[in-house]
Image (tube, helix red, strand yellow):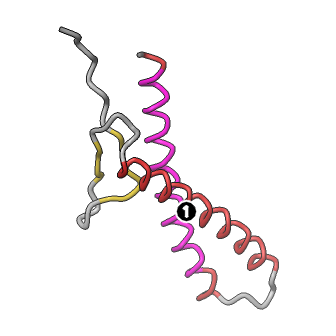
Amino acid sequence: MTHHAPTPARLLPWGSPEGKPCYLLTDGSGPLSRVADIVESAQLGMAGDLMGHAADLLDDPRATSDQLRYLLARMGEALTDVCRIAESRGARLLDRADG
């Protein structure tokens, strides 16, 4: 009988409606893993776009406080996404190094 080590849970790049983390138990090659990879890529792309927008807005002396607050709120959301992605990827790297 072959005994395989259990595959660690993957932290997904989205939370539950209550804001709690969501995890996936998989070997990393299934359709939901691919969806998670696509979502991560989109989230990272949007965060990069926001950084460019922030640079433009901060260089604009006509930027209003409402515009800056809105940008800051979106950047906070993007940072939350990026931190979740980093945590998930870091955990998977550690699991590969241990395995």
Q: Residue at x 56, y 56 (%)?
A: 41
17, 66: nearer the viewer: 17
Region of the chain picked out in magenta, as a range? 69-96
Q: Secondary structure at mark 1?
A: helix
Image side of residue 80 versus residue 44, left or right? left
Q: Which residue is mark 1?
A: 42
Percent position of residue 53, x then y: 71, 74
Q: Nearer the viewer, residue 99 or 33?
A: 33
Q: Looking at the picture, does residue 3 appear above or below residue 68?
A: above
Foreground residue, 76 or 96? 96
Quarter in which the C terminus is drawn: top left
Question: In the image, what residue occupies the spot 48% across and 18% down?
Answer: 97
Task: Name the residue at the front extreme.
Answer: 1
The amino acid sitting under disc 1 is Ala
Residue at the image position 48 percent from the left and 48 percent from the top: 85
Residue 47 found in image quarter: bottom right
